[in-house]
Amino acid sequence: MKKVFITGITGQDGSYLAELLLQKGYKVYGFVRRVALEDEQHRLQRILNILDRIELIPGSIESYPSIYKAISSVRPDEVYHLAAQSFVSYSFEDEFSTLQSNISGTHYILAAVKDIVPHARFYFAGSSEMFGKVNTVPQNENTPFHPRSAYGISKVAGFDLTRNYREAYNLFACSGILYNHESPRRGFEFVTRKITSHVAMIKLGIISKLELGNLEARRDWGHAKDYVMAMWLMLQQDTPADFIICRGENHSVLEFCEKAFSYVGLNYKDYLVINPKFYRPAEVEILLGDYSKAKNILGWNPTISFEELVVEMVEKDLEYNSKKIQQFYPVQDQKARVR
Ligand code: G4F
């Protein structure tokens, strides 16, 4: 049985990837912070359904000894390094911790893989944020990087480290340059989930407005479930390489809002408020990818459309918030609340 070691298994991508690899017959090991093991319901919420079929190893991507110990004990065939400080806005507030944990974390894992299991295959979660201030639309694997945040810079460093371990030490190491990918498991701080959760709460009468920053930014949004399949395919090839993973279609934040509100029969203009505090010091205005290489070499194609993504996220947030209402309000009140 093949063994896989996943950092960031408790996140959106990690949880979908773990499910996919269980289906494919892997023995799945997840590297998690020790505190997560003490707060299952909250920190392990995305993997509660598979907890009895995976093994969690406590440690920190900021500690080389803990990574070395974990990889020595598992001796994985495949390693997916997904853990990171991944919220771009936060990287403006604390550049130091973003750079420290994202760059060193990737370096430590690559170094441990090279020393302990040099034949293991390694995946690094790169990002379209590496392109940043783009001058080529759409971007492909040859487009130069121009990151616009500490987060983007940390991902460029991780990408370069991964390529260097491949070239210098012959590691089977690949980077996926993933564009924004969402799902009902997305964190509430990201704009898509912020919108769908607010739309659901507005529809259910829990809140009355949604505050956002830059509505003009355009993103090439896809579904995380599709994207973890691409990660796995990258590690099944004969030779290691880097791939752009996207849908090849972009939409503005405003369009996402319009779609989400109109799905529940509301007009966004009645609820949306611009709050300058959500603007970033340096914005990535437009991202649009070209996934031809992934299509030709991996045989990968996205299967879930933008519209399907928005609808799934809104529906799940309606379900989630309706359950919360049932817990806190008597039946009589619930009827009065729904708009
Ligand atoms: O959802 P976002 O926070 O995602 P962002 O910054 O594009 O980054 C995401 O995708 C990257 C891949 O390209 C990943 F590498 C990264 O880890 C993360 O998953 O923001 C999307 C856009 C931005 O232009 C932002 O300025 O939405 C705009 N926006 C407008 N109002 C807002 C808000 N973003 C957030 N989070 N909150 C707002 O109120």
Image (spheres, rainbow, N blue to C red):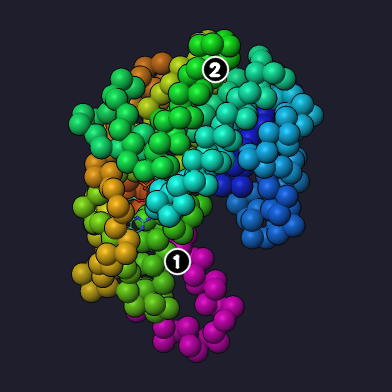
Magenta stretch: includes residue 65? no
- 197 is higher (above) or lower (below) than 218: below
List x then y, in percent, for residue 99.
49, 40
**At x 70% / y 59%, what residue is drawn?**
39
> Which range is magenta?
315-339
Task: Quickly name the residue at label 2.
Answer: 165
Whether residue 16 is visible to the viewer of this picture, yes or no, is no
Whether residue 228 is visible to the viewer of this picture, yes or no, is yes
Direction right: furthest residue: 73
Task: Quickly name the residue at label 1.
Answer: 318
167 vs 10, nearest the viewer = 167
Direction bottom: furthest residue: 332
Image quarter where the C terminus lies is bottom left
The earlier-in-sequence mark between 1 and 2 is 2
Q: Amino acid at mark 2?
A: Tyr
- 163 is higher (above) or lower (below) than 34: above
Magenta stretch: includes residue 322? yes
Image quarter where the N terminus lies is top right
90 vs 186, nearest the viewer = 90
